[in-house]
Amino acid sequence: MLEKPAWLRKRLPIGLNVQKMETDLRRHSLYSICQEACCPNLGECFNKGEAAFLVMGDVCTRNCRFCAVASGIPKPIDPLEPLNLAKQIRGMELNFVVVTSVTRDDLPDGGAYHFAEVVLAIQKICAGVGVEVLIPDFQGSIDALTTVINSRPNVLNHNVETVSRLYPDVRPQAIYIRSIELLRQAKKIDSNIVTKSGLMTGLGETRDEVLQVMDDLREADCDLLTIGQYLKPGKNHHPVIEYVRPEVFHEYEKEALERGFKGVVASPFVRSSYRAGDLYRRINKHME
C-alpha cells in the first residue's frame, strides 16, 4: 500500500464563512458533495459562494470502482426537489452552483427531465446564480442530452474520469467513446454551450494516455478541463497505483492549454467542481 505523500495532506478549513455555509446546509437538509466528501477545497469554494449538490437520491444504479456512492435500487424521484432546492439555494448567498446526480439507468431518460427542471427552477428563483450540471452519460441518449441542454445551464459537464484502457476495470458499465461522443453531440445540439470534463490520475494511466484523452476531448470541442489525484475511498475500491507529483499536474495544465482548452485546473487536490465559477468566468473573458 502506497503511503500518502506530504503534498496530499491538507487541513480542513475553518472560519465564519465555512461555519455559516455548514449551518445553512444543515438547516435546509441539503446534501452537499463538498461537505459529505470532506473535500479539502471546501473552505475555498464556500468562501467564493460556490457549492455542489446531489439530486435524485444517493443510490446509484452503477458500481464504478473509484466511487464511494452506494450502488443499488434508487428511490423514486421527488418531483418537488427542483423547487425546494432552488428556494434553499436562494437563501444561502451562493453565486454559482454545481448540480450533479447518481446515475439513474432505471429511468427512461436517465433523469434528464429532472436535471432540466432543477436548472429552470434555479434560474427562475435564484437571480444571478450560475448553474453547472455534471451529468451521467444517459446511456448515449441524444434526446436526454437535448432535454438538459434546452434548459440552458451555464456549463454542461460530463467526466471521462480515466483513460480508455482502464474503463473495463474502473468504469465497467461505462464506455469511453460514448462519453467523448456525448460531449461532441452537446456542441452539435448547441454550438454555444460551454462543455467541460474531468480526469483522475493515479489509477495506472500513462502520460501518453492522459495526453490522448486531452486530444480526444479537444477533438470533441470540449472547452474546460479539470485534472486531479484519485484517492481510494474504501478497501474494495480500485487501488491507488501512483501519487502523481504536483509538477506533473503543472505539465498537464500546460499541455491542455496548448491544445486549446479555454480553462484548465490541474493539481492533486482538484475535484470536478473545484473553482467551477472561476472556470466559467474565465471562458467568458476568453470569448469577449
Image (spheres, rainbow, N blue to C red):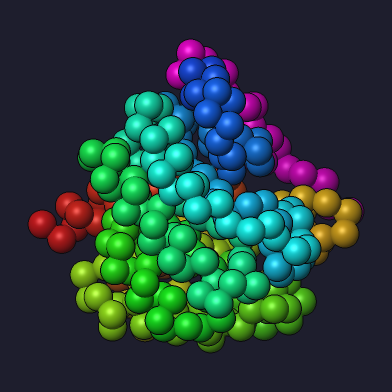
Extreme residue in the left direction: 288
Q: Nearer the viewer, residue 144 or 44?
A: 144
Give percent across and percent down for residue 57.
63, 52
Q: Is residue 245 visible?
A: no
Residue drawn 28% across and 80% down? 189
Q: Is residue 210 magenta?
A: no
The stretch in magenta equals: 1-18
Residue drawn 50% across and 23% down? 24
Give percent across and percent down for residue 282.
26, 51
Give percent across and percent down for residue 154.
29, 56
Q: Is residue 4 magenta?
A: yes
Can you tell which quarter of the image residue 47 is in? top left
Residue drawn 30% across and 62% down? 151
**Left or right placement of residue 170 versus residue 258 in this view:** right
**Left or right placement of residue 257 versus residue 244 in this view:** left
Give percent across and percent down for residue 200.
60, 61
Decide whether the magenta segment is chiefly helix, strand or loop.
loop
**Left or right placement of residue 85 versus residue 73 in this view:** left
